[in-house]
Amino acid sequence: MNFYEAEIIKCTKRIKKIEENPDPVKFRSNKILYEIERDLNIARLQAWKEGKPFIEGFTPPLMRALGFEPMALDICADRSTLDTSRFDTIRALGLPDYACDRTIVCIDMCMKKELPPPNLLVSHNCSCDPVKLAYNTMGRLFNIPIACLDFGLEANNDTLQYVTDQMGEIIELAERKVPGAKYDESKLMELQAIDRMAYGYLNDIYQLRKRVPCPIAGKDAFRLPIPPSYYADPKKALEYFRIWRDEMQERADKGMGAVKEEKLRVLWAVSGPFYADPFSLLERRGVSIPWFQFDVAMRWSGVKYPLYGDETEYGRKLSPLEEEARIMNSFSWGGLAQRWIDDTLFVCRDLKINAIINFRQVGCTATVGLAKILEDRAERELGIPTMHFDGRQLDHSYFDAVQVNSQLDIFVDSCLHRME
Amino acid sequence: MEQQLRGLLEATNNDNRAKWALDWRKRGGKVMGLLCSYVPEELIYAAGMLPWHVMGTDQSETSRALMYRTASSSLYCNRVLESFLNGELDFLDGVIATDREQDLVRLWDVLVHLKKTPFAHIMHVPNQETALGYQQMSKEITALKKAIEEFSGNRIIDKSLQQAIAVFNKMRTLLIKLYEMRKNELPAVSGAEAMEIVAAATIMPKDEFNFELDRLLPYLEKRKAPIKYAHPRLLLSSDTLYNPAYIKLVEQSGSLVAMDDLDPGSRYFWKTVDTNSTDPIYALAKRYLSRPGHPRMFAWDRQVKQVIEWVKEYHIDGVLEMPEMYSLPRQFRVPIFHAQLTEAGIPNISISRFHDMADAGQLKTRIEAFVEMLQGRA
């Protein structure tokens, strides 16, 4: 069974479960989320069968506007079945098994034909080295066209122009090399308009996270909100965001929180173990997790600057292609320490966070080396403590639940003690 | 002359490494620590400062660095941070890094966080050798020039930059002459010696280095390297391999390292800067981006092609790749490097290494097995 088939079954089961036995604690909008996920995988399966082109490495609206099916290899890897033999494949190829899990697991998935090999790969460094390098490797392993999309260390007008120019060249390459690829700017603008509305809802949700008690549960905060243009039916996906926002509003208005008596507000950073649930333990201790801080989290929620249509950050109106370049050019992990740490501390202030749990993902070249700087600055500038939690997203052999729970317990105790 | 040669060969020994930098400072000059061979040193030289490549501590212990970094991140960066934290590099006036690897960017972030040097600059090196890449590299070099001018108080005029380019080109030409001698059946220098000479070039004032090597070349023409084995001839490919003990280990395992693809090796000096260009900044951008590439660069196929050309020119029997543990660019390139060399009919092997020879026993066994395989083919 390939990945898409497995996902269709998984989503169908979850929809059925919600229909038969709805959990009042969980969001009703989850059902729509599973429906759009199921439909996305049906569409992908169909596209694979029909030989339609797949792409990885651009933003979802741009991938769709070029007539490609977006792959989202990292997200597929995040949802893959836990199987340590995947790391055996990586080792057998001579690749580093200590690189970030999601960037190497997707190679195994393509090799085992759980995913189609992409028809075009855009190897970029907007977030991190492992993504760039994994795509470089994959493109050559599968002998498919690859393009380099290069990002500088600063997000400014100069680098924006540089990225936009490269995107233009890659579009030409795609049209030349991949049958069926054709750039449609009106399609891009149509998708941007839909995504812009979704980002507006995400900003509403962000504002609601400020409430005490925080109306969002840790597990929901930890979820990556994916823009509607990624889905097969962007309008239905947009509807999901609207309903999710409305439910959050309802909960906030009723004073409902994930924890009854909120004693501590924690920001969870970088990533986490996808096979474990550290959030329940925290919530049982009266700890809410209003925010999961990762690479694009703030941008998608319009914190500091809204995405699309903003004329303040670069001081001018941007073209549709520049809007896409802007998103990738300002990924929080791709720049210098200041970008990631300033962003993280900004959210901590804004959401009245009392402590940070920083997941040190093995092989994450973007964030592991910043852990101590984050800790130092959070303590110095905000007076809040940071706990570093070493682990892997997908390699569960690395995880010791007893040890992690005990670490979290001790950290919560010390934070509460500090607040007394 | 052998005594003069020893001076170069021992230049990067722990006891000598800082010597030129300290002398430079005694004379009132500033010393700029470089963390990457993509930094266009000519600018620093043109501003009257000494460019000095940071190799990192030789000590195995990096506990201070591990407060900021993990053991499973770039070992080179860990060693460099340790040397900043243990005081070995207190004489540096500044540090310049690039984003050759993201790990290196994070090292620079820590140095800035800790305010380790009065001057710190980082430049982006485009990942691609295209017209857009060259333009962007030119902008990065211009930004570096401006930062250096502000710090040094010296304006870098075109004339001084062109003079600097001439000095660096001379160094490159001399080293290329030295490497020509490695093509001989009995070369002038061993693999370890070649690396030591190039490493010396990365820390010595260039005029002094040029003078020394220039007068040594006639002697080297006649010299026979003190090697135990002339065959099989290997090409060694790695990054930030500043510990010659690894090359000595390879050469004690029944082979000769007759050519290299190393930062303190061919990649440091290959290709000169175009002196006919009316825009020296653009000429620097072109040279640095199009020199034989580090695996961080997008064009892996071109990198392997370069190695294949060297294999032919230097009569190489096999390629030994020694990625440093936790250095991701090269580690990710391993299967591609292996497949393309194999397709070209070139025997090759990739064996990961550390820096401090802690893995020497295991390495020796694997290298000997590779060497035996090559001997069996001969």
Image (cartoon, rainbow, N blue to C red):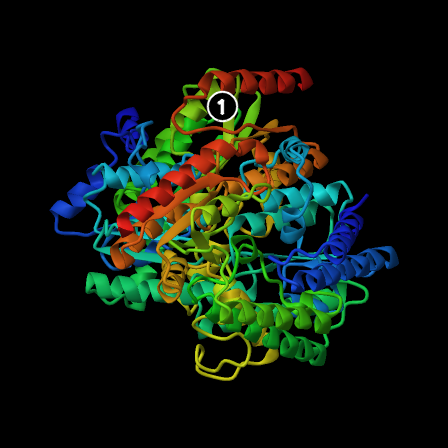
Res. B263 visible in picture: no
Number of numbered discs visible in the structure rendering:
1
Residue at image position (35%, 64%) is A349
Q: Secondary structure at mark 1?
A: loop
Q: Nearer the viewer, residue A126 or A47?
A: A47
Check the picture and name the quadrant holding the N terminus of chain A: top right
Report x, y in % for residue A59.
62, 65
Residue at image position (68%, 79%) is A190
Query: What amino acid is at disc 1?
Result: Leu
| Residue to which mark 1 is pinned | B186
* Relative vertical location of residue A222 with respect to residue A204 in this rendering, above or below: above
Q: In the shown orientation, is residue A205 left or right of residue A56? A: left
Residue at image position (48%, 69%) is A208
Report x, y in % for residue B336.
65, 40
Residue at image position (64%, 53%) is A75
What chain letter is assigned to the residue under label 1? B
Crowding at dot 1, Cα within 10 Å, few <14 / some 14-19 / many 20+, comes out as some
The image quarter in which residue B226 lies: top left
Report x, y in % for residue A45.
82, 55
* Relative vertical location of residue A309 with respect to residue A416 in this rendering, above or below: below
The image quarter in which residue A411 lies: top left
Report x, y in % for residue A102.
60, 46
Q: Residue furthest right?
A: A50
Res. B226 visible in picture: yes
Q: Nearer the viewer, residue A100 or B61?
A: A100
Q: Nearer the viewer, residue B21 or B169?
A: B21
Q: Nearer the viewer, residue A363 or A44?
A: A44
* Relative vertical location of residue B367 with respect to residue A157 in this rendering, above or below: above
